[in-house]
Amino acid sequence: MEYRTLAEQIIDNVGGKGNIASVIHCATRLRFKLEDDTKANAEVLKQNTGIITVVESGGQFQVVIGNHVSEVYKAIIALIGEVQNRNTQSENSSNNKKKKRKDNIFSHFIDIVSSIFTPVLGIMAASGILKGLLSLVVTLNWLSASNGTYQILFAASDSLFYFFPLVLGYTAGNKFGGNPFLTMAIGGALVHPLMLAAFQQQTTEYFLGIPVTFINYSASVIPIIFAAWVSCLLEKKLNTILPSSMKNFISPLLCLLIIVPLTFLVIGPLATWISLLIADGFQAVYNVTPVVAGAIMGAIWQVCVIFGLHWGIIPISINNLSVLGQDALVPLLLPAIAGQVGATLGVFWATRDTKLRIMAGSSVTAGIFGITEPAVYGVTLPLRRPFIFACIGGGIGGAIVGYSNTLTFSFGLVNIFTFTQIIPATGIDSTVWGAIIGSLISFVFACIATCLFGLKKENNAESRSSIQLPVTPFNSAGKNPTQETIFSPLSGVVISLKNTPDETFASGLLGDGVAIIPSIGEVYAPFDGEVASFFKTGHALGLLSEKGIELFIHVGIDTVKLDGMYFSPKVKVGDKFKTGDLLLTFDRKKILEAGYDLTTPVIVSNTDDYSSITGLELNKSMSSGSALISVNYK
């Protein structure tokens, strides 16, 4: 399994399988609930190349992985099996031990909310995007609401939210430690056609002589969560009383008989009242000072994301949509995302650090689609100034969005598709343009400020961990040659860099050069110089020549995932070398058998310092030590 090694390392450093009370994942993070936090080793995990960072917040031990978090989660589950929420179970155990974790109320709330909503976050985002796209095509008169194509696609986009009580009944049942199918059945009763018909007829019905107030629970959130919680409490109590031969069917029977009527009589109306109170309360605060609300949310949103506290805000947006049919909160967050993307792009343009440039380039793309953790943890936050500029830009843009009173009409992750979700039924109006202008201003401000002031001089040369290529200006007191030759560090077939099967390298964004398909697993020094940097996984290194040429050699595509397997460095950072010295060996056969492409980019990372970088021999087989690249001085 591709992520098995990483999964094993994570399990070991959270205290082992026995220390994991529960684990779920969201868009980029593994969220662990641990029996004993002191057994976890966050610092070791932070040093792992497959992990962006570790955050301990909201009662959870959060391991930030990135876009492939679901694959790592599957690998962990394959190793440890499905984990029950032992914290919930132990509350009813006769030998309940004193817990070493001391959760406060807010941390407990964050843990509950994230556990209930995380499993359906992806489909919620997809449904919201589809709704937004349908609004766009209707506004552009490409489809009408009466068209069969529109109706089928609308049903696809609306089904999750329409039957939300069923879905949340299942996830809430899992979280509260009960039978999730039982709580799902309770959710189903809330949206049963008979109950919806009774609501539409507005007639008074009675349950055992008690009048029932029928409410439309379709798309509701809070009622089913409360009902599931009460059901799980009752189920656990019944399971301790009833004999094992009866509890499998008597417990669900009694829960249905008691909880469903109780929900329609008490829990549902009470939870609906709380929902209305939350929605009206938010709307009242927002209406007083929408500009200030926008500035605050735009500025602090990414800070909340860092600590995983955004889960305390997301339910407000979902509740607004279920109660009011619209939401003013999510649009305020668009500039916060745009600011981080702008700051990250500014780092990409301004930095000379090869590793940082690679990280920034990939993070920009992820950020556009709403995943900002790689940008925040890998780029802007370590450099501090870019993160601050992004938050300032988010605050400015958020104030503009608040002033325009922009609303969304479906839920989704905050990303580029959110702009389609703010289109009202009447078509594109000033509120939509307000969101676009606010986001653009945030993006442009953060990008320009970062380019001009975001990187300290020392950070430009050695800003972050692995790759650090110090800039040594060429200076030979009037004896500058017009040209230098870089010799081939590998034996193999030389191809154009544009043919590299990786867009980041092929585009030339990291510098000009060539690529080599190696025939021998050895890397030799291409000039006299020193080792400026070396990935701890051994697959890539940065070299600095005595004349100031910065060369980056990346053996293979995506070989960082091998985590050092099959690579044997022969030098370390700071070592001096002469042309032809052996720098690195790698097991070519095993890397190929593992399914990796061994195309090796050889790039002059400070390309801008020279007038031209020319590959001397392309599409030919070459031995190490042969003339490979001509560097021409300005």
Image (cartoon, rainbow, N blue to C red):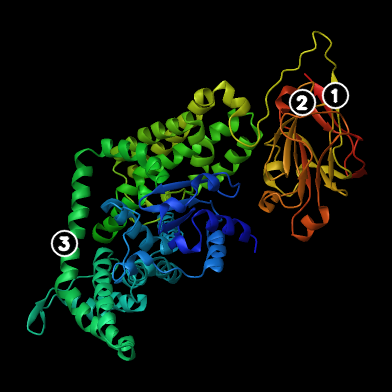
The answer to which of 149 and 59 lies nearer the viewer is 59
Relative to 237, is 442 on the left or the right?
A: right
Relative to 179, is 283 on the left or the right?
A: left
Q: Residues within 10 Å of mark 2 (few under 14, many from 20)?
A: many
Residue at the (83%, 56%) spot, across then down: 589
Q: Earlier in the sequence, mark 3 or mark 1?
A: 3
Q: Is residue 557 above or below residue 209?
A: above
Query: Disc 1 marks which residue?
Result: 484
In the picture, residue 221 is in which quadrant? bottom left
Screen quadrant of the C terminus: top right
Say which amino acid is labelled 3: Trp
Q: Nearer the viewer, mark 2 or mark 3?
A: 2
Q: Secondary structure at mark 3?
A: helix
The answer to which of 530 and 271 lies nearer the viewer is 530
Q: Residue furthest bottom?
A: 245
Query: How far apart are the two marked residues, 1 and 2, measured between alpha carbons?
Result: 9 Å
Measured as percent of width and height from the top left, residue 348 is found at: 59, 34
Residue at the (42%, 49%) spot, across then down: 414
Q: Secondary structure at mark 1?
A: strand
Q: Is residue 29 above or below residue 84?
A: above
Mark 1 vs 2: CB contact within 8 A: yes
Q: Secondary structure at mark 2?
A: loop
Q: Earlier in the sequence, mark 2 or mark 3?
A: 3
Say which amino acid is labelled 2: Ile
Measured as percent of width and height from the top left, residue 606 is found at: 71, 27
Q: Which mark is residue 549?
A: 2
Residue 420 appearing in the image:
no
Screen quadrant of the N terminus: bottom right
Query: Disc 3 marks which residue?
Result: 273
Q: Residues within 10 Å of mark 1 (few under 14, many from 20)?
A: some
